[in-house]
Image (cartoon, rainbow, N blue to C red):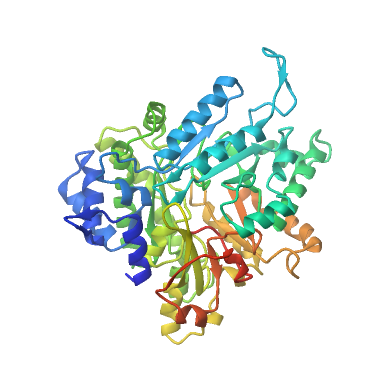
């Protein structure tokens, strides 16, 4: 590991053994043995899984690395929840949310069934405060729960496009200038929904209404769509979640939106194949097999926040086998970011995870998983693996990483991307390496690539499309129509989309800097004295 990767591993995941921090190899053994012993797996299988983790060909989700072997081992990440339109339902959601967040699980909530603001409540004679009020209550629960003492709560909120409060929802994170200034001066200053990502939910009827002028909701569909597009380009939120065709009614999402379900209290179960370390198609098949076995065993091993979660998990047994290192694989093979015939062969093998899951489920007398593949924004585990995150392109050659240390100060440190460093060491100019910023000027290539890869993923893909800053030549009022017309063509092939317009939010965790600047300050850790975005005009997706 590089010094930076080792620091992240030691800070987040390494257990203390006999007065010292465990090594990566020791962690690999701890995780594989604890998880697979829960299904009485053969020793040979445990050793094989241990080896692919050691070699970083497969990395279980961070919760596995952190919690495996602990007395309370909740190794599955996020809960998928649905808000019920009753007093009891509101109270139940707050209970579930706090229970999940305090055990380290993020949450995603579908609020579409909540009656709109102002609607009559018959029993009490009052009126409803609407879904936006409940969302903000859950956001504040997250503000008070600092997971593990250092990680902010991860929360997502979705609302169907037909809900009467949808336009208020679309603009609810438009903070007043005074609030934005206070937030810039102190990132911890509370602002509306500042701990929650939001998405407008689209279904089959939306696309019917959008394209059919005679549909009774045609005007409303266009109003919602174009209002959302305008907000996305200016402020980066909301995004879209798409649940159509065979995926209709799977409106519940985890915090990062890659796992989908129709059942309240379903749960994530994540791990990723590191494509950059896979040497051939046979190796891809072997790792897909072993990784699927590990995640299936995790559905038996992991503790859960409350009993209902176990009931739904036992019924659905969803796996979230993902990919990372996709862009590094392309770079290593001299290819541009985008659809590729050689990469397709690896994706077709990845797609066989369902077959392996069925075999292991039969061997271990478990229910067969309803779905097995989801691509998460791998964040810390891709940093440890020193590869590109999920299907994301290389973020940038050098950046500042912002993180919280304990419960008080925010810190930042300079990082040179290890993939960029490999290429620079080989004599390539860092300014010539294709990354998220260069692709921000070729947005359709990003979107179409995600749509292409989605064919091989039965859940969803969490990926952030970088955009130039609002007001720039490539992102302004005159470009809104072209962007919206481009996106509507691809939306039916996606399960969701999120964008990040450069500099649109204060306190962004990763900030691009010059390669030369970062190389001069490697290894130093700084206490933040101002908003990190004041230092550079560039920003990026949450990958920490």
Seen in the picture, residue 481 relative to 294 is either above or below; the reply is below
Q: Position of residue 278 (x, y in %)?
A: 35, 65
Placement of the N terminus among the 4 image quadrants? bottom left
Viewer-proximal residue, 112 or 191? Answer: 191
Horizontally, is 214 left or right of 126 in the view? right
Image coordinates for residue 54, horizontal then vertical, percent = 26, 61
Disc count in the image? 0
Query: What residue is drawn where x is 70% and y is 50%?
Result: 175
Asked whether 171 or 314 is in front, the reply is 171
Locate residue 269 relative to residue 178 in the image: left or right: left
Residue sitting at the far top: 123
Q: Residue at x 51, y 62 (%)?
A: 392
Kindly indicate the quadrant of the structure image that contains residue 300. top left
Q: Position of residue 94 (x, y in %)?
A: 52, 30
Above or below 287: residue 419: below
Vertical placement of 125 versus 384: above or below?
Answer: above
């Amino acid at each position: 590991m590089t010094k930076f990767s080792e620091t992240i591993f030691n800070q987040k995941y390494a257990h203390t053994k006999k007065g010292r921090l465990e090594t990566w190899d020791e962690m690999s053994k701890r995780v594989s043995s604890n998880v697979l012993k829960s299904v009485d797996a053969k020793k040979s299988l445990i050793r094989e899984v241990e080896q692919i983790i050691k070699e970083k060909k497969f990395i279980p989700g961070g919760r596995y690395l952190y919690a495996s072997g602990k007395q309370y081992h909740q190794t599955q990440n996020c809960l998928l929840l649905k808000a019920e339109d009753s007093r009891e339902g509101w109270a139940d959601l707050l209970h579930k949310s706090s229970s999940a967040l305090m055990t380290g699980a993020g949450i995603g909530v579908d609020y579409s069934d909540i009656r709109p603001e102002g609607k009559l409540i018959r029993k009490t004679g009052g009126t409803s405060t609407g879904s936006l009020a409940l969302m903000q209550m859950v956001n504040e629960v997250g503000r008070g729960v600092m997971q593990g003492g250092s990680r902010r709560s991860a929360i997502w909120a979705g609302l169907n496009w037909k809900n009467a409060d949808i336009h208020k929802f679309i603009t609810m994170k438009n903070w007043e200038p005074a609030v934005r200034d206070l937030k810039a001066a102190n990132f911890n200053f509370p602002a509306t929904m500042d701990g929650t990502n939001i998405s407008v939910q689209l279904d089959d009827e939306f696309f019917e209404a959008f394209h059919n002028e005679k549909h009774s909701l045609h005007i409303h569909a266009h109003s919602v769509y174009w209002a959302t597009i305008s907000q996305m380009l200016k402020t980066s939120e909301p995004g879209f979640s798409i649940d159509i065709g065979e995926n209709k009614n799977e409106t519940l999402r985890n915090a990062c939106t890659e796992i989908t379900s129709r059942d309240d209290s379903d749960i994530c179960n994540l791990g990723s194949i590191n494509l950059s370390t896979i040497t051939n198609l046979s190796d891809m098949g072997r790792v897909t097999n072993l990784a699927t076995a590990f995640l299936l065993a995790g559905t038996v091993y992991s503790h859960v926040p409350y009993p209902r979660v176990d009931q739904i998990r036992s019924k659905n047994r969803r796996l979230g086998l993902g990919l990372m290192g996709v862009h590094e694989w392309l770079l290593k093979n001299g290819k541009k970011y985008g659809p590729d015939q050689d990469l397709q062969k690896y994706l077709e093998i990845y797609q066989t995870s369902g077959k392996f899951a069925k075999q292991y489920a039969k061997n271990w007398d478990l229910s067969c998983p309803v779905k097995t593949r989801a691509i998460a924004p791998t964040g810390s585990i891709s940093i440890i693996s020193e590869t590109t995150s999920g299907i994301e392109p290389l973020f940038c050659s050098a950046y500042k990483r912002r993180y919280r240390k304990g419960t008080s100060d925010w810190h930042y440190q300079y990082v040179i991307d290890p993939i960029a460093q490999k290429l620079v060491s080989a004599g390539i100019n860092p300014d010539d390496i294709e990354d998220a910023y260069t692709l921000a000027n070729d947005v359709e290539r990003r979107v179409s690539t995600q749509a292409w890869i989605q064919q091989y993923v039965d859940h969803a893909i969490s990926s952030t499309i970088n955009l130039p800053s609002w007001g720039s030549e490539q992102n302004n009022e005159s470009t809104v129509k072209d962007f919206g017309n481009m996106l509507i063509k691809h939306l039916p092939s996606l399960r969701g989309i999120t964008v990040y317009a450069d500099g649109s939010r204060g306190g962004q965790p990763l900030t691009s800097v010059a390669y030369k600047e970062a190389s001069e300050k490697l290894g130093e850790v700084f206490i933040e004295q101002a908003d990190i975005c004041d230092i550079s005009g560039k920003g990026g997706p949450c990958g920490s």
